[in-house]
Image (cartoon, helix red, strand yellow):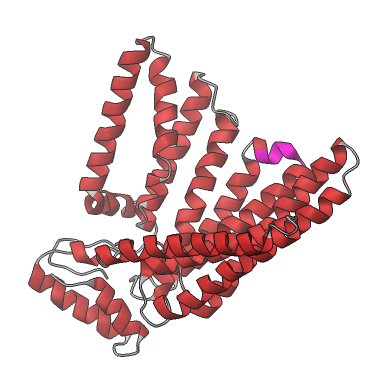
Amino acid sequence: MFDRNDLRAAVEAGVLSESAARDLERFLTRRSGADASGDPESLRFLANLNDIFLSIGILLLLAGTVAFSANLILPEEPTPLRAALALVPAMALSWGLAEYFCLRRRLLLPSIVLCAAFCLLTGLAASLIVGNAAAEDIRNSSDIFYAAGNLGMLGGLTTGAGALAFFLRFRLPFGLFVLALALAVTAYSGVAFFGNTGLVIGGTLSLIIGLITLTVAVFLDAGDPQRLTRRSDHAFWLHLAAAPQIILGLRGMTLGFFGGSAQTMPASLLLVSLLGFALLSLALNRRALIVSSLLTYAIALTALIGNMGLGVVNTTIFTLLVLGSAVVLIGGGWSTARRMVLTILPRGGIFSRIFPDELASPGLARA
């Protein structure tokens, strides 16, 4: 067995060219007779148990830093501005630890924890400062409405700014995930409080933002169809940010915001949309898109099977059996299912980069 991640590292370090890496992968795959280690979606968050141990320690240290700073600053005059200042030492500590654990040690799980902590602390600090200023201007219920909108937008923008700064400094792919979600929160806040609330509640905006994020992810994947460089990791996190928003958008537009409708027609439309989304997931070779939609699949199936009058218990049983069987079949035969889907898609040119080829057999490498 060989580790595809080593090939990625060699390409990024300039030790191997992409063509040489593909040739080496082809050779090693033939020798191993299996391609499991070449999975482009292999999760590399965890090298060993020490990463979890270290991440827990980082969280405890940051929590202690916030508590210590708050104890020094807040007792004298507990204002939102002082509360924001109490977060600054933890923000600085997060960045400083990232310089070592992310930039030098390249430990992914601790780096993810530090990125999330820095971005959230940045957004919270800015929200406290602006929230204090906005609270002073509140005179009626309408002012509360606009203050909440401003708070949501500023919190999203500052969190996104923190994620962008973290990404530019440390090139951590997870930073793009935080950035994408922060920008989405900013858009939702702006539209909900200052535009058309129905676009958010109805799922339209969620679908639009999800599709835009998915387009960027597909663009990055198309630039690295062999998934040998960091672009593939960047795309993975954007796929992970896009999928839930697309699914929630589809659900909102068919079953409603609270998913309370159990009518056959809306549930059928949702199920057909989800099946199309599953085919796209297979074609793109990104399981994250299917995983994010499992709950919505269950809701749609429950609505359809429930309308047959089978009762709550039988509906639950049949839903679990159908959904579980589908997941096992697709997961166990992912490569076979991909090859079947690819036969109906155009090949060559940009399409071969967007929809990368699947192995014809365990002994052959990806084209």
Vertical relation: 301 (above or below) 55: above
- In the image, farthest residue toward the right: 139
Q: Quadrant of residue 159?
A: bottom right
- Whether residue 235 sits left or right of residue 121 in the image: it is left
- Whether residue 224 sits left or right of residue 260 in the image: it is left
Q: Which residues are magenta?
A: 196-200
Q: Residue at x 39, y 26 (%)?
A: 301
Vertical relation: 169 (above or below) 159: below
Q: Residue at x 23, y 40 (%)?
A: 328
Vertical relation: 11 (above or below) 57: below
Residue 318 appears anywhere in the view: yes
- Quadrant containing the N terminus is bottom left
- In the image, farthest residue toward the bottom: 15
Question: Per the image, is 318 magenta?
Answer: no
* Image location (x, y in percent) of residue 50: 27, 66
* Image location (x, y in percent) of residue 20: 26, 85
Q: Residue at x 38, y 63 (%)?
A: 57
Decide whether the magenta segment is chiefly helix, strand or loop. Answer: helix
* Image location (x, y in percent) of residue 24: 20, 81
- Whether residue 331 sits left or right of residue 211 in the image: it is left
Residue 348 appears anywhere in the view: no
Pick whichever, 148 or 5, lies toward us.
148
